[in-house]
Image: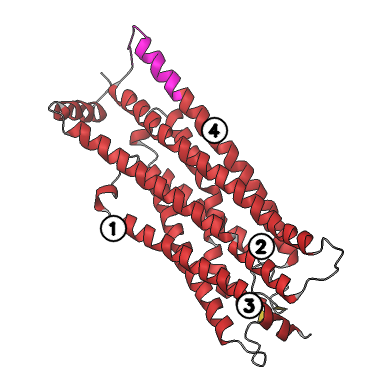
Amino acid sequence: MDRCTQSYLIETSWQVRSAYVGMIVFTAGLAVLIIKTVKQKDTRHVPAHPNFKKIIFTISGATCWFSVLCCVSYIVLLITSLRATKENCFTNMYRYTCALIRGPHFLAIPMYSSTHIALFLERLVAISKKDYENSLKWLGWFISLYLCFASVVVALGVLDIIDMKYDVLHCTYFSDRTKLIFDWLLEATSVIDIFSTVGDFILKNRVAKSSRKVRNSSSYHNYTLSQAYQKKENLRLLLMMVPISTVFAVGHLFFCTVYLEIDGIAVRYFTRNGETELTIEQEAIRTALSDARLIIFVSLIGLIVRQYVKLGEKLMLEKQTKTDKPDANKIFDLFNQQLAGPPM
């Protein structure tokens, strides 16, 4: 059987088309969720440090980029599958065509793997630097630019320029050589996510312990209102971030395990009776599973987006509760005076 016919039979199978439709539905749903979130004026201006909000803004932009372009890429692949015949060989593509179809949305994937380590570093600086609330306003943009730069480097690093002119039976971003690199990076970033989650937990306990120590101390010498405010803000954000980073780390580890093992599991299952080659139907199932595994990643992103929306809603509710108090204006006046002048 020639490669054109083999590609046609795999790509036009109901299994592969179902995987394409599933990805279109999931990514379109994620795009709608992001758009609805951005349109909510009540949770757009979250009372948090500008650096924290800049990082969240960058990740939100990456999520929107990923969901829209991923949806478009699967629409293109589905249309190609529907238009394909044994004669026109539409499904038997060159690697550079696949890079154009799948490459743009892939740029966002490495960024997610660095998201929570970036937020952990931002909170670490916030806790370590006493005047953080009024300094280092550039840190958020620096981290955001670094995330974008790292994503481009990773995307180019796993793109095999040498194999660009080779045709493929199924449209994929990787060659066999660069897939090994990406698999290693996926494992490494999963471990980093786990460590950043542990780091968030340690920071939370450290700030909570420091706050209790100050409250129980009989002397408040040199302990300013701005320091008290900063400690309270750090503890408040970390209490909300720890559950989110935990969910992301567990979800990332689960996705990593499924992503790396599903192909091998399918092959071992189909060859359990000693077969040396897979049938076309078995190849179609394996290909469909290969694409459908990204649904786990999309679902994880949607869950994390929803958690950050709830975080914003909670912060806004706390802000509204405090500002509705009769003595709120006096408290904020004192705080602003202390920021403008020397410590009391």
Of residues 199 and 149, the one drawn nearer to the viewer in this rendering: 199
Q: Residues within 10 Å of mark 2 (few under 14, many from 20)?
A: some
Of residues 229 and 82, the one drawn nearer to the viewer in this rendering: 82
Q: List the single residue furthest toward the top.
A: 218
Of residues 309 and 188, the one drawn nearer to the viewer in this rendering: 309
Q: Nearer the viewer, mark 1 or mark 4?
A: 1
Magenta span: 207-222
Q: Amino acid at mark 2?
A: Val
Q: Which residue is mark 3?
A: 13
Vertical comparison of 285 with 314: above or below: below
User: How far is the residue under mark 2 from the one under mark 3?
Assistant: 28 Å
Q: Nearer the viewer, mark 3 or mark 1?
A: 3
Q: Residue at x 25, y 18 (%)?
A: 344
User: How far is the residue under mark 4 from the one under mark 2?
Assistant: 29 Å
Q: Which residue is mark 4?
A: 199
Displayed quadrant of residue 336: top left
Residue 200 location in percent, x, y?
Answer: 50, 33
Q: Nearer the viewer, mark 1 or mark 2?
A: 1
Of labels 4 and 2, earlier in sequence is 2
Q: Amino acid at mark 3?
A: Ser
Q: Residue at x 71, y 74 (%)?
A: 281
Q: Residues within 10 Å of mark 3 (few under 14, many from 20)?
A: some
- Secondary structure under badge 1? helix
Of labels 1 and 4, earlier in sequence is 1
Q: Which residue is mark 1?
A: 39
- Secondary structure under badge 4? helix
Q: Nearer the viewer, mark 4 or mark 3?
A: 3
Residue 158 circle label: 2
Q: Amino acid at mark 1?
A: Lys
Q: Nearer the viewer, mark 2 or mark 3?
A: 3
Horizontal side of 194 relative to 60 (left or right) equals right
